[in-house]
Image (cartoon, rainbow, N blue to C red):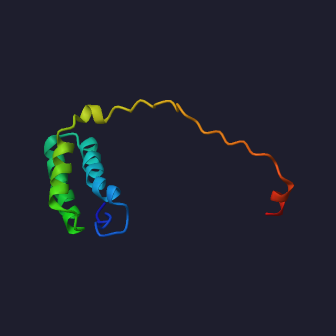
């Protein structure tokens, strides 16, 4: 991506989404970069882009550090899918009045 298409921090999106976006982006870099030096180079660029979109510096630095401390090999492993323990089943009776729609 050659453009800074990241979400502005002042947007009206939920706060949790905005606060977790840097971590998700740094983890993506950690998975995609095969060397630590390559990760550092791209992480510098991402940090600059996030700060240009007004993300708080402490939020960017914390996400960057947490992503760097993740083991890349573990990040590349598929996650185990948890079975649906509670399924919601909705049973309705058929009504001819619904044919009007």
User: In this orientation, which residue lies closer to the viewer: 48 or 94?
Assistant: 94
Residue 27 picture location, percent across and down: 27, 45
User: In this orientation, which residue lies closer to the viewer: 56 or 87?
Assistant: 87
Report the quarter where the C terminus lies.
bottom right
In the figure, is residue 86 to the left or right of 78? right
Q: Quadrant of residue 31?
A: top left
User: In this orientation, which residue lies closer to the viewer: 19 or 48?
Assistant: 19
Residue 69 picture location, percent across and down: 17, 39
The residue drawn where x is 28% and y is 52% is 25
Question: Is 71 located above or below residue 12 in the figure?
Answer: above
In the figure, is residue 51 to the left or right of 19? left
The residue drawn where x is 15% and y is 46% is 65
Question: Is 12 located above or below residue 96 in the figure?
Answer: below
The residue drawn where x is 67% and y is 42% is 90
Report the quarter where the N terminus lies.
bottom left
Q: Quadrant of residue 53?
A: bottom left
Residue 91 picture location, percent across and down: 72, 42
Residue 85 picture location, percent across and down: 52, 31
């Amino acid at each position: 991506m050659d453009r800074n298409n990241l979400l502005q921090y002042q947007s009206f999106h939920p706060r949790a989404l905005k606060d977790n976006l840097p971590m998700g982006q740094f983890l993506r870099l950690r998975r995609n970069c095969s060397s630590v030096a390559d990760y550092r180079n791209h992480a510098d660029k991402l940090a600059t882009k996030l700060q240009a979109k007004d993300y708080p510096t402490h939020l960017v630095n914390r996400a960057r550090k947490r992503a760097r401390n993740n083991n890349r090999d573990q990040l590349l492993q598929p996650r185990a899918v948890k079975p649906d323990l509670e399924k919601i089943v909705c049973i309705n009776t058929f009504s001819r009045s619904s044919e009007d729609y």
